[in-house]
Image (tube, helix red, strand yellow):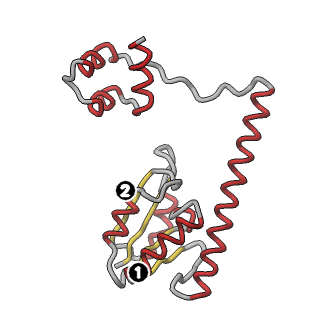
Amino acid sequence: MNIAYIRVSTVDQNEDRQIKAMKKENIEKYFTEKVSAKDAKRPKLLEMIEFAREGDVIIIKDFSRLARSTQDLLNIVKQLDDKGVKLKSLKENLDTNTSTGKLMLTMIGAINEFERANMLERQREGIAIAKAKGLYKGRKQVERPDNWEEVYPRWKTRELTAEKAMGLLNLKRNTFYKFVKEVSK
């Protein structure tokens, strides 16, 4: 079975480019997620690894979609190898089942990790320069939702779970508890 793993880092990003690249690969099952690769314990990645069987081929656009660190990449590839699952990267066109393929995989993983570290360093430098010029304002503040006064008391009296309240307010966990802390003062 040909299985596609498609990942973008944020919900704002679009996976269409990766899906388009998979069109000629005769994909039978897609695993798609919108989450950062900083952690290898991603729900769809784990589900895909569990789903894949001996003889299956997992197809990715490029290795950076699978992992951010060389170690994570090698660990994922080892898990797949142990199950008899092949991995195909469209961009790098590598067979990870050969010794040359494994060497190239390690090198590509290290280069991707190096590029990511450099990008983050440039980002930090840019922020520091902007702060020094008084141009950096930080992340835009999230306003308390209009329905806060309706939902918060229901959460406080345990009529709603925190998860349900966050859903009704369309807030992430940290932001919800930040507002709870502000209100509790």
Residue at 76 percent across and 41 percent down: it is 125
Between discs 1 and 2, the one toward the N terminus: 2
Residue 53: image quadrant is: bottom left
**Residue 76 placement (x, y as % from top left):** 47, 70
Q: Nearer the viewer, residue 21 or 8?
A: 8
Question: Measured along the vertical axis of the image, is residue 43 above or below residue 178?
Answer: below
Q: Count of labels shown?
A: 2
Marks 1 & 2, CB-CB < 8 Å contact:
no
Check residue 127 in the rendering and tell me which mark sits there, or answer none.
Answer: none
**Residue 70 placement (x, y as % from top left):** 59, 66
**Residue 102 placement (x, y as % from top left):** 58, 81
Residue at 63 percent across and 81 percent down: it is 103
SS at mark 2 in the image: helix
Residue at 44 percent across and 31 percent down: it is 174
Alpha-carbon span between mark 1 and mark 2: 20 Å
Question: Measured along the vertical axis of the image, is residue 34 above or below residue 18?
Answer: above
Q: Residues within 10 Å of mark 2 (few under 14, many from 20)?
A: few
Q: Amino acid at mark 2?
A: Pro
Q: Residues within 10 Å of mark 1 (few under 14, many from 20)?
A: few
**Residue 73 placement (x, y as % from top left):** 53, 68
Check residue 43 in the rendering and tell me which mark sits there, or answer none.
Answer: 2
In this rendering, position of residue 157 left or right of residue 77: left
